[in-house]
Image (cartoon, rainbow, N blue to C red):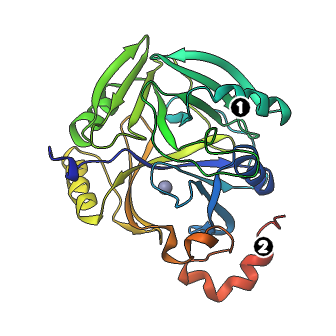
Amino acid sequence: MNSKSSQISGLHHITAISDNAQRNLDFYSLVLGLRLVKKTVNFDDPGTYHFYYGNEEGTPGTILTFFPWEGIGQGYPGTGMATEIGYSVNTGSLEFWEERFKKFHVRVKEKMERFGETHLRFADPDGLDLTLVEPTIADPRKGWETKDIHSENALKGFCQVTLTLREMEKTARILTDIFGYRLLSQEANRYRFITDAISTANIVDLLEEPDGKSGHNTAGTNHHIAFRVKDESIQMALRERILENGLLPTPKINRDYFYSVYFRESGGVLFEIATDNPGFTVDEPLKELGSHLQLPRQFEPDRKIIEEILPKLK
Ligand code: ZN
């Protein structure tokens, strides 16, 4: 598993839980300026939306997805969870974001340094923890532009994700021995892992909290994180490696926009391995991404009922 092409290529997407759908849509598309690249339903619960936000094409490594479960109740982050999502921005744009967050009454937590990067930590309306990062190496990706967020300030996609764990050793071994990551550096109880297979969305921080309380996985918390592979043959090879390491991956599941394999890693975080193919233009042209409610084939006969159940969006 040493050749780059047979490795994980960083993050594919992160999936989180929110409460109110409209509030989630307004925050991520209007306040943060991400593109809604797909509006569909939870394939296991078609009365709930599944929103995908990303860059123009919904490139893997830029995709944050939500299940908005109305009235699910407030969760809290803790051990066994992804606890912070990091988006990269251009150096110098944090001032723009501080102003913007003031204007939209966004809960800003702090501005701080970590591994030589400047962070602006904040929370979404459900309390989900995010951070905008000015990385030490400039991120070449172009973010989605909106009326009031031009490309120099736009969010480019993920640079990193933090997992909080009671004990990080076994999770670290999955990253290094199966996924091809290496330990880059350490600051106190934060261990930074990186893969050289790709230059963006390629960092995972493990935050070790031996006495940490476990999280409660409802609104305002992350459900799972998905790692990226080029195609299903790499995915199936990795699935074998996961099995050999005593973990229990699911079979390959068709998610219409990618193929997925899930497994619970040793520290409690739900991991997914997702393919680049076929991508978000499989059922909508690039220009119209996110503008229609897309249903998987099995639910198409029930479209009328589903549309009635789903919350109305502005
Ligand atoms: Zn997923």
Q: Is the CB of mark 2 within 8 Å of ligand 1?
A: no
Circle 2 is placed at which residue position?
Answer: 309
Quick one: 286 or 223, which is closer to the camera?
Answer: 286
Under mark 1, the amino acid is Trp
Q: CA distance from mark 2 to mark 1?
A: 36 Å
Residue lying furthest top: 188
- Cβ atoms at labels 2 and 1 below 8 Å apart: no
Residue lying furthest bottom: 301
Specify the quadrant of the image occupied by residue 298.
bottom right
Q: In the rendering, at what x and y percent does residue 237 appear? A: 20, 57
Q: Could you tell me which residue is drawn at 69 percent across and 64 percent down? A: 48
Under mark 2, the amino acid is Ile
Quick one: 257 or 79, which is closer to the camera?
Answer: 257
Specify the quadrant of the image occupied by residue 277.
bottom left
Circle 1 is placed at which residue position?
Answer: 97
| Dot 2: element | helix
Q: Could you tell me which residue is drawn at 24 percent across and 39 percent down? A: 180
| Dot 1: element | helix
Total numbered labels: 2
Which sits earlier in the primary sequence, circle 2 or circle 1?
1
Q: Is the CB of mark 1 within 8 Å of ligand 1?
A: no
Q: In the rendering, at what x and y percent does residue 79 appear? A: 51, 29
Q: Could you tell me which residue is drawn at 23 percent across and 42 percent down? A: 178
